[in-house]
Amino acid sequence: MAAPQIPNLNSLRRGRGRGRGIGRSTDNGPESRPSGKDRIVQGTDNDASVSRLSAVDLGYLTDAYATALTPRGSATRRFPIINRGTYVRTTAIDQLVTSFLGLYTPEQTQAKRKQIISLGAGSDTRVFRILSSRQPSDLVYHEIDFAVNTTSKIQAIRSTPQLQQALGINTPDAEVSISEMGDALHSPSYHIHPVDLRSLSVNSDRDLSTILPGVERELPTLLVSECCLIYLTPSEAEQVVKFFTEHLFQSESQPTIPLGLVLYEPIRPDDAFGRTMVSNLATRGIQLQTLHKYASLEAQRCRLKEQGFGDGQAGADIEFIWKNWVYEEEKERVAGLEMLDEMEEWQLLARHYCIAWGWRDGSDASVFQGWTTLKAQSDN
Ligand SMILES: C[S@@+](CC[C@H](N)C(=O)[O-])C[C@H]1O[C@@H](n2cnc3c(N)ncnc32)[C@H](O)[C@@H]1O
């Protein structure tokens, strides 16, 4: 990239960016005029970042980037059961992601490049944790969210050298561009897209490179929906997944690309705890729209199979993962951080959230090999 096009992240201001052809992001469907419901959904990211910071501050998680990505003044100590839930959810998804990425060898980065696309990434810190440990990068990481949330994230990146360093974009010659509106960011290993997922349609006649610039259609790819698709209607959520399985990563001219999906979402809405969970969220205007359709682990596995991940589907609730994925020593460490005397409440809460994962091997069965060894839950 020629020097005059390289923006300085510290001095860039809204509206002065000189992005490489990244225009104003007004063409992404329903988000141009956010409804009240959309605003509430966008605001759920705040809850997620505050919970993450609470778990970090108390020693559950190590995450050097959580403070920079939580709105100033909003740090709050969560209840012990919430902190433990955040710990299990984060470390379990980390485990799935690490297994997908495989061992890091700086010499072979080009040969083994992979791609992650995080749906509704909000202020998630995973990209900073991963890229800071894989330089030079063997990974292209994409994050999609509403423009309001991508703009805040980009503002945090602009004002925090530590975040820029993690992304490898802290040097004067770094190839990075930010859109005029300050809502899209593109660099060799990291892209932030201000896109309403509901605008991703298999019937779109738009040039794919303009919808999600930087996506490499030939790389083994992992989609992550950490509490995101649940806010869409069942048909919208299905359309989003189809966009990737049938449109972006499927073409007659290339062998099928290895593709996986990791979901984290609530389940079991129909028992007493589930009903209370749903009605508590409803009082805040939050509706978990796919919850009844994918109400059990079995329903999640069927969903994955039907929606293009035919080579493997598995899932487990958070309680199962705590019991079966966390080593005894680590359990003791975590249990020692805070008194958790509401054991029954923890179990109830943890049984109402799950992680489900599914994949198709495509041209390379080794990509998701590691997932076959993870302990999954066979019941409902
Ligand atoms: C509960 S937050 C989770 C954030 C992040 N994945 C995490 O776990 O920390 C849900 C996120 O999904 C995003 N989201 C929900 N519906 C979306 C849509 N239609 N398009 C883009 N992003 C969406 C919200 O804006 C929000 O940032």
Image (cartoon, grey):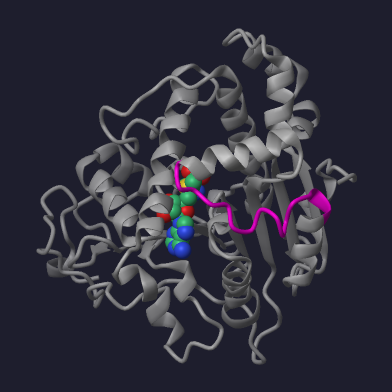
Give the left or right position of residue 292, taking residue 140 as reference. right
Q: Main secondary structure of the magenta part?
A: loop
The residue located at (21%, 60%) in the rendering is 182
Callout count: 0
Up/down of 214 relative to 373, above or below: below
Q: Residue at x 26, y 74 (%)?
A: 22
Q: Is residue 332 visible?
A: yes
Q: Is residue 136 visible?
A: no
Compared across the picture, whether 204 is left or right of 168 comes to right
Highlighted magenta segment, given as a residue range? 284-298
Q: Say if 15 sits above or below 20 in the image.
A: above
Q: Residue at x 11, y 64 (%)?
A: 15
The picture places residue 275, in percent across and down from the top left corner, at 67, 40
Residue 14 placement (x, y as % from top left): 13, 58
Choose between 215 and 147: the one closer to the eye: 147
Relative image position of residue 31 (x, y in whole percent): 35, 68
Q: Is residue 112 magenta?
A: no
Counting from the top left corner in percent of width and height, residue 320 is at 79, 33
